Amino acid sequence: MPTEKAPRSPSALIRYLSGKWPIVFDATAPKPLKIGIRDDIRAIENELSDEDLNTALRVYTRMATYLEALRPGAKRVDLAGNQVGEVSEAEAATALAWLRARLAKEKVAKSPKPMAEPEPVLEPVLNLTHSRTAKPPHDRREGLVVEIKRRRTIKRQP
């Protein structure tokens, strides 16, 4: 019976990658990663499952500090720390959009929600008269009207 490993936490996965490649995976001063670095890691590293590797890269590349590092013309790095490409204008614009969306979402979450005005409470007016010819009361109130009617019971003979 094969045993399945429990998924690691994202922070543990990032610590693992930064321990293995400290030049590339630095959470305090991240550098833009080479496009396709996942395949490079997979070719060298077999200890991480595909799911763990995908989780680690997703969390790392969505950190605010990483997104801020994606400026037009910034150099991308491979696993050895060599510069292998540049961040394009479109990639930088996408990163900026992610940051703005995140800030807007946080701003909405922090803003106090306006309280709705309470609805006026309507007091019921009881109409206890049984007759249909009864005169309406003189002090009739506006609002909810509740009528109570008596039910007739018919006794049947067996």
Image: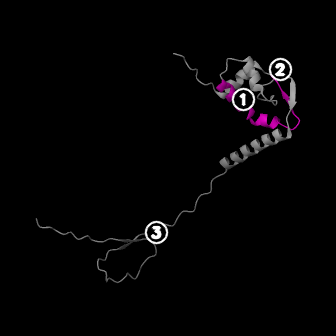
Task: Decide which of tag 1 and tag 3 comes sooner along the chain.
Answer: 1
Q: Position of residue 118 (x, y in %)?
A: 54, 62
What segment carries the magenta color? 50-79
- Height in image: 11 above or below 117? above
Residue at image position (35%, 84%) is 135
Q: Which amino acid, by three-letter code, is at mark 3?
A: Leu
Is residue 51 a member of the stretch shown in magenta?
Answer: yes
Whether residue 17 sits left or right of residue 140 in the image: it is right
Quadrant of the rendering where the C terminus is positioned? bottom left
Q: Position of residue 154 (x, y in %)?
A: 18, 69
Task: Decide which of tag 1 and tag 2 comes sooner along the chain.
Answer: 1
* Label 1 SS: helix
* Label 3 SS: loop
**Viewer-proximal residue, 25 or 92?**
92
Colour scheme of the picture: one colour
Q: Which residue is mark 2?
A: 80
Q: Which amino acid, by three-letter code, is at mark 1?
A: Leu
- Height in image: 45 above or below 55? above
Q: Which mark is residue 10?
A: none
The quarter of the picture where residue 77 lies is top right
Query: Quick check: can you spot residue 69?
Result: yes
Give the CA distance from mark 2 to mark 3: 74 Å
Is residue 104 a member of the stretch shown in magenta?
Answer: no
Q: Which residue is mark 1?
A: 57
Residue at image position (64%, 52%) is 112
Q: Which amino acid, by three-letter code, is at mark 2?
A: Ala
Contact, CB < 8 Å: mark 1 with mark 2? no
**Viewer-proximal residue, 104 or 123?**
104
Q: Which residue is mark 3?
A: 122
* Label 2 SS: loop
Q: What is the count of numbered marks?
A: 3
**Viewer-proximal residue, 64 or 56?**
56
